[in-house]
Every structure is written in C-alpha cells, then in structure tokens.
Image (spheres, rainbow, N blue to C red):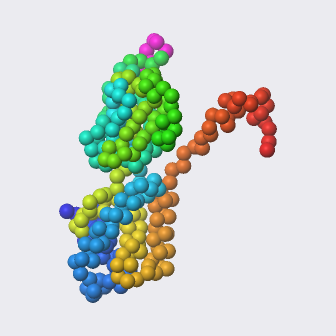
C-alpha cells in the first residue's frame, strides 16, 4: 500500500483515495478538525469515487491515453473482446477509436502493441533486391469503422473473404463483438485502439495512480457529488473549481484527428466531378 506523508503525494502513485475523499468532505464543512465525520462517510465517498471513475472511463477526453493491442486473425468472422476473449482484456471497451490490420508478411507477431523496438529486427527493413521490401517487413492497412450495427446489417455479402477494409464493433456485454469485413484469412494481425482503463474497484487505502492533474479534478468533482448526501447544494465555488479542473484535463488529453470527408464529397470520387471543380468558390 502506498502512503502519503503529511499531505505530500507518493512519488510514483500520488495520493490515497482516503486523502482526496477527506479533502472533498472538507469543502462541505465535514470532517474539519474531526467534526461530523464517520466511517460511513468514507465508505460512501469510496463508492461515489468508483462510480464517478466508471463514468469518466466512457469519455475520451477524461482518459489520458489510448491503448494499441494486437491479436491474430484466425479466419473467423467474429472476434470477442473482454475477459477470456480473442482480445483478452479485463473489461470490454465501450467503443473502439481506430483499427488497422497488419499483413505480417513473414514478420513475427507483435507483442507490445504498435511499433515497439522489440517488434522488428534491423534485417526487417532490408529491402533486398525484390523492390517490395525484404522478408519480415509488415504492411499496415487502416480499417474504416462501420459505427452502427444497422449499417453492418445492410451488407449484402457478409461472408466475403478478401483483404479487410471495414470493421464493425458491437459493444455487447460482457464480451464485445468485432467483425472485420471482408473476412481475412489467418496470417493477419488486428491492432485495436481503445481507451486505457482508469482505476477500478478502489478502496480507501488505494493510491490514485493517475497523472497529477487528476487529483484536483477528483477532489472537486467528489465534493459536488457528495453534497446532496449531507443535505447541501454544491456551492458555486465547488462547481466552478470542478469545471476548471476538468477543463485542464480536457486540454491535456484532447487529440483532434485530421478531418476526413466522405468519398462522395471529394472531387475525384464525385460522380459529378468535372475538371476545374476544385477551383470553384462557394
């Protein structure tokens, strides 16, 4: 167990849950000088914290990073994400942020997600004499995500087997369902990007193992959540401080991808394209 020292966070794991809950209650006038504080207040704070972090887990801007996890294709039409699934992770993601398929081309299976130093040997980048890359040099293809199950259902030939171009993820519980299309044979490797897990199932003595900017946000947001339990409305100061702290996290975590346009709206792919269309002004 990590321990704080007179209010100073541990160097590697930060504050304890009990530290931040105690500070949150102090903003409500509870627990100052040991007044009006009881064990049930701490237990309630722990439950509120776990519920709050479960909500934050589903918001991209409240999660500090994405995880790139790989698994091998087997020729199946459906792969399962979650405990004991094809992508064996503790909790199935509510959505996937991006996917790419890697044609291994003789390379070894990835063990550390994306391009980690241990994934490739120097010889992997020796192009040799074939002009197409030496043996062991993998090739990645980004997949377009079909967001809605209704759109996947409209595919006429779901059993088509070829190089994958699209995929659909159905966040079923407890195992999510990933469907690539067309269905690739064995020998491919899928890389799935999803939100990293925030701490779960915390207790009063657990460390808050998150970046430092989260400490303030957790404390103020907890104060706002716990206020009704003590017959109070969260004060304007508490609400404003919580919003400010959350905006700091938003600024730190926001990553804006390059804007993509449907093919029908790009000049060359547009059936109504004529030379010079790209020069027209609205």
Question: Image quadrant for the N terminus?
Answer: bottom left
Question: Image quadrant for the C terminus?
Answer: top right
Q: Residue at x 26, y 74 (%)?
A: 42
Vertical order, 84 against 184 (above or below): below
Q: Residue at x 43, y 25 (%)?
A: 159
In reply to whether residue 123 is colored magenta, the answer given is no
Q: Nearer the viewer, residue 249 or 266?
A: 266
Q: Residue at x 50, y 40 (%)?
A: 150
Horizontal side of 249 relative to 264 (left or right) equals: left
Percent coordinates x, y for residue 137 in the rendering: 41, 23
Q: Residue at x 43, y 15 (%)?
A: 128
Q: Residue 72 appears in which quarter of the rendering?
A: top left
Horizontal side of 258 relative to 198 (left or right) equals: right
| Res. 167 in view | yes
Percent coordinates x, y for residue 252 in the rendering: 48, 57
Vertical order, 63 against 242 (above or below): above
Percent coordinates x, y for residue 227 in the rendering: 38, 78
Vertical order, 139 against 235 (above or below): above
Q: Nearer the viewer, residue 268 or 133?
A: 268
Outermost residue on the left side: it is 1
| Res. 121 in view | no
Outermost residue on the top side: it is 129
> What residue span does the magenta drawing correspond to?
125-131
């Amino acid at each position: 167990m990590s321990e704080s020292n007179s209010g100073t966070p541990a160097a590697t794991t930060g504050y304890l849950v009990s530290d931040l809950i105690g500070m949150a209650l102090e903003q409500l006038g509870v627990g100052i000088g040991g007044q009006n504080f009881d064990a049930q207040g701490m237990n309630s704070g722990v439950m509120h914290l776990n519920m709050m972090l479960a909500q934050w887990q589903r918001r991209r801007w409240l999660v500090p990073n994405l995880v790139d996890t790989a698994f091998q294709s087997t020729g199946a039409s459906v792969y399962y994400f979650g405990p004991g699934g094809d992508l064996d992770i503790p909790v199935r993601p509510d959505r996937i942020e991006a996917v790419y398929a890697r044609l291994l081309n003789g390379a070894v299976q990835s063990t550390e997600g994306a391009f980690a130093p241990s994934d490739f040997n120097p010889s992997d980048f020796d192009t040799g004499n074939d002009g197409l890359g030496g043996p062991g040099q993998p090739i990645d293809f980004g997949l377009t995500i079909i967001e809605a199950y209704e759109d996947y259902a409209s595919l006429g030939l779901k059993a088509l087997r070829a190089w994958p171009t699209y995929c659909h993820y159905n966040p079923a519980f407890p195992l999510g369902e990933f469907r690539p299309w067309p269905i690739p044979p064995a020998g491919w490797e899928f890389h799935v990007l999803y939100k990293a897990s925030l701490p779960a199932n915390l207790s009063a003595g657990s460390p808050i193992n998150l970046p430092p900017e989260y400490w303030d946000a957790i404390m103020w947001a907890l104060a706002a959540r716990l206020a009704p339990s003590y017959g109070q409305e969260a004060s304007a100061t508490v609400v404003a401080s919580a919003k400010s702290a959350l905006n700091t996290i938003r600024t730190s975590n926001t990553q804006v991808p390059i804007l993509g346009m449907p093919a029908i709206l790009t000049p060359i792919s547009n059936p109504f394209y004529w030379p010079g269309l790209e020069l027209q002004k609205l």
